[in-house]
Image: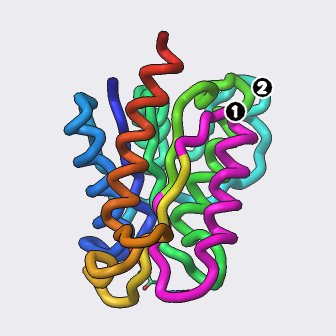
Amino acid sequence: MKITGIVCSPRKGGNTEILVAEALNAAREKGAETEMVLLADKQISPCDACQGCVEDGVCVIEDDMQDIYQKLENADGIIFGTPVYFNNVSAQAKAVIDRTYALLWTGKLRDKVAGAAVAVRRVGAGQVLSILYSWFTVQRMITAGGCIGYGMDKGEVREGAGGGPGSTALGEAGAIGKATVKMVNWVSK
Ligand SMILES: Cc1cc2nc3c(=O)[nH]c(=O)nc-3n(C[C@H](O)[C@H](O)[C@H](O)COP(=O)(O)O)c2cc1C
């Protein structure tokens, strides 16, 4: 089983990466093979609405998204992490989301399990989770849930509380990793 984490922050070693890494650590403990992709290293253009992919499911833009397409297609589960930027996903996350238009027509993301990891200073994480769940649903992915980690500076999310009593953001991130593995096992039965 392969679980791939996509970190859509331009900031390496930041809070989104910490959450996604924690989810992947937990997935590995449950037996999954994992991979983490940092978009900080990538050049991904927005969708140019050429509509060519509607015919053949192939995106003609030659950039780093071509590699991400392969990684998404090869994954059984995806942990998609983004920071909150102006109550929305990061521009990097939106570029990837829009470029998966090419995978919609061939159903290449269908039945994959997807979990969300959202890093935020204070406001907008709920909206961003809704945006990600909505994308998962349109692509007919199966949602394993999401986690929110609060923090501004790099690493602050490590100290952050989770949503439940006594829970931590890192604990919730780990729970998303475990839930993703469990749901992939169910789907593949
Ligand atoms: C351009 C920009 C916009 C932001 N917008 C918000 C926001 O709307 N709400 C919020 O609570 N934090 C906002 N933040 C703070 C980030 O969400 C927060 O620092 C987060 O932990 C960054 O994650 P990272 O370390 O993975 O980059 C913003 C930060 C930047 C750089």
Q: Nearer the viewer, residue 172 or 48?
A: 172
Where is 93 relative to 90, above or below?
above
SS at mark 2?
helix
Q: How is the image coloured?
A: rainbow
Please indicate, yes or no, whether residue 121 appears anywhere in the rendered image.
yes
Q: Residue furthest top?
A: 189
- Ligand 1 near label 1 (Cβ, under 8 Å)? no
Q: Residue at x 71, y 41 (%)?
A: 137
Q: Residue furthest front?
A: 165
Image disc number at residue 140: 1
Q: Nearer the viewer, residue 23 or 136?
A: 23
118 is within the stretch colored magenta: yes
Where is 30 relative to 14, above or below?
above
Residues in magenta? 117-144
Quarter-wise, where is residue 8 in the image? Answer: bottom left
Q: Residues within 10 Å of mark 1 (few under 14, many from 20)?
A: some
* Whether label 1 touches label 2, CB < 8 Å: no
Q: Residues within 10 Å of mark 2 (few under 14, many from 20)?
A: few
Q: Residue 65, position in %: x, y?
A: 48, 47
